[in-house]
Image: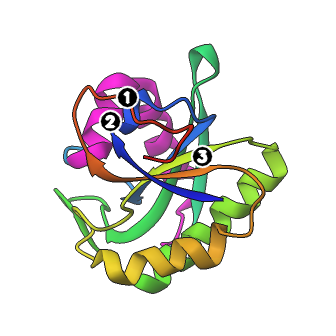
Amino acid sequence: MIHEVEGDILLSKAEVIAHGIAANDPMNQGLALSLHERYPAMHKDFHHWCHQQHPKPGAAWLWGGAGGVRIVNLLTQDGGYEGANKPGKATESNVNHALRALKKIITKEGFGSVALPRLATGVGGLDWDAVKPLIQSQLGDLDIPIYVYTVFHAGQVANEANGS
């Protein structure tokens, strides 16, 4: 069940937050920056994972932190490798594959709710009209609430219960 909400995704009550990045992303822009600042261990662990696994765009990586925090890093963008100071643009194919990987993680881990932004439409550069159907196609049949933060309002808790 997909619910479009407005507010600050960092204040979500969902069990897991998913967001799009590139492999070895410096996490210095957008939601990735906010997550990096809030969870610096995630950034360090993500880079370690990238150096060990050399993931390709379309992959996903689940991080767990103190207090039960769960973040899924979706590799929606190219770039971010050694020497690159910023990630490349996202592609619809990468987003689709990453969402498929997210669905597998949700099922395997038994998550009861997920929050994600307008995936790959900020730094990733994609159009929301192209990404929204991918989210609906990959996650729409899950029997859990999927909160898509369509409008960001800093410091505002979204009404996830009513989907607004």
The quadrant in which the N terminus is found is bottom right
Q: Earlier in the sequence, mark 1 or mark 3?
A: 3
Is residue 96 or residue 60 the one in the foreground? 96
Is residue 85 or residue 100 the one in the foreground? 100
x, y (%) of residue 112? 74, 41
At 81% from the left edge and 54% from the top edge, which residue is drawn? Answer: 107
Identity, as a three-letter code, of the amino acid under mark 3:
Val
x, y (%) of residue 55? 54, 64
Above or below for 83 versus 56? above
Magenta residue check for 36: yes
Q: Which residues are magenta?
A: 30-57
Choose top left, top right, bottom left or bottom right for residue 41.
top left
Please name the residue that numbered disc 1 is placed on: 157
At 26% from the left edge and 25% from the top edge, which residue is drawn? Answer: 155
Above or below for 89 versus 87? below
Judged from the image, the secondary structure of the residue bearing numbered disc 3 is strand
The answer, for residue 104, to whether it is visible in the render is yes
Identity, as a three-letter code, of the amino acid under mark 1:
Val
The reply to whether callout 1 and callout 2 are in contact (CB within 8 Å) is: yes
Above or below for 131 versus 164? below
Identify the disc placed on residue 114.
3
Characterize the local packing of mark 1: few (<14), some (14-19) or many (20 or more) Cα atoms within 10 angstroms. some
x, y (%) of residue 51? 49, 51
- Label 2 – label 3 distance at C-alpha: 14 Å
Residue 151 in the figure: left or right of residue 77: left
- Label 1 – label 2 distance at C-alpha: 6 Å
Identify the disc placed on residue 93.
none
Residue 129 in the figure: left or right of residue 136: left
Identify the disc placed on residue 8.
2
x, y (%) of residue 119? 39, 63
Q: Earlier in the sequence, mark 2 or mark 3?
A: 2
At 41% from the left edge and 25% from the top edge, which residue is drawn? Answer: 39
